[in-house]
Image (cartoon, rainbow, N blue to C red):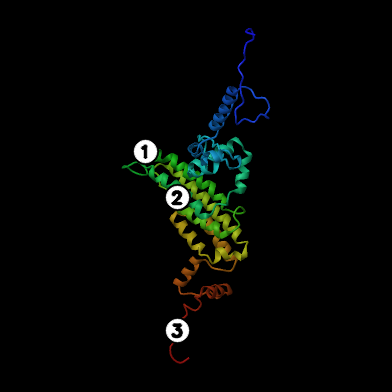
Amino acid sequence: MSGIVATPVHFPHQHQDPRLSPSHPMSFHTINSAGRKRKAEDEEPSADDRMSTSPSPSLHQRSLPAQRVTKRLRPATTGRPLPLPRLLETLDADSLRSILQTICQRHPGLGSEIEHIAPRPSVSSAISVLKHYESTFQAAFPFGGSPTSDYAYNRVRPALTNLLEALADFTPHFLPPSEAQASQSLSFLDSATELIHRLPDWTTFQHRLHKQNAYEEISKAWTSVIQEAAKRAGGVHIQYGGWDQKLTKHNQQSGGKLQEAVDEMSKHLGWMGGQSTTQQQQQQQHGGRGDDLSSVRQELLSGTYGSNLPVRVGPW
């Protein structure tokens, strides 16, 4: 009997239900329950933690892909050449003219295209160009000394050549059939002849040939225009425009170098039955009135009919 080991007897707790399933030791059950309780308490955030971890507006926006703002990538600013229209705006007339001449030399076919597109030069624009050459010519004269000497001629010779070449190019442009309006042709010739009058009379005979040749060419131009104008509209442009008087004045100022054109004017005015302004002045100075029909018609059109007749006073 003494060899039997007495095992301690555990009496159930007085409040424990004996019908429960067999339980494991109390210490293990108690530890696991306390651990689970602490773990649940640790995982549940406190009121302060909930306030501190509340999502900010930026986080809320980043969490919504639909409201995300994408920044457009802009290319870097780099240098570039000017567009052609802006480049042409910076060019003056001389630079633009030089560029066009270079292009036409490299591409001859473009010359006719430019001539077709460019507006037709007017009398005022052509005379403006000639006056520009004349101003350059006048500015080339040296200070002091005779303006007609050989020294002055050698100084201004390049500018004089440019002026005469420009005059020789513009004059045919305003002659028939290139120019259909006689008034335009006569207006250009009038201004061009004035320009020739202003050329110096050089001391050396050979130098004076430039001006003499210019007079010859302009006289032929006057003759050509008068002949063509006489064929159109009964020659009204030369008959009543006072061009005969202007031409006569040019001839006197040139020393008779435009006599060929003056004779052509008188011939056509006589053939049309009219009188030139010079003939009318001479006739009025002599106090005579033509008896022919053309003289009466001319006086009626000019408003001078009967101006030379004596006025009778008293009974008839």
Give the spatial CA distance, label 1 vs label 3: 65 Å
Q: Position of residue 235 (x, y in %)?
A: 59, 64
Number of on-image labels: 3
Q: Which amino acid, by three-letter code, is at mark 3?
A: Val
First reached walking from the N terminus: tag 1 or tag 2? 2
Helix, strand or loop at label 3? It is loop
* Label 3 sits on residue: 311
Image quadrant holding the N terminus, namely top right
- Pointer 2 local density, CA inside 10 Å: few below 14, some 14–19, many at least 20: some
- Pointer 1 local density, CA inside 10 Å: few below 14, some 14–19, many at least 20: some
Give the spatial CA distance, label 3 vs label 2: 52 Å
Helix, strand or loop at label 1? It is helix
Q: Which amino acid, by three-letter code, is at mark 2?
A: Lys
Residue at image position (52%, 74%) is 299
Q: Which amino acid, by three-letter code, is at mark 1?
A: Tyr
Q: Which mark is residue 47?
A: none
Q: Position of residue 45 (x, y in %)?
A: 53, 35
Left or right: 36, with 128 as reference point: right
First reached walking from the N terminus: tag 3 or tag 2? 2
Q: Which mark is residue 131?
A: 2
Residue at image position (52%, 36%) is 81
Q: From this viewpoint, is residue 100 visible?
A: no
Say whether marks 3 and 2 touch (CB < 8 Å). no
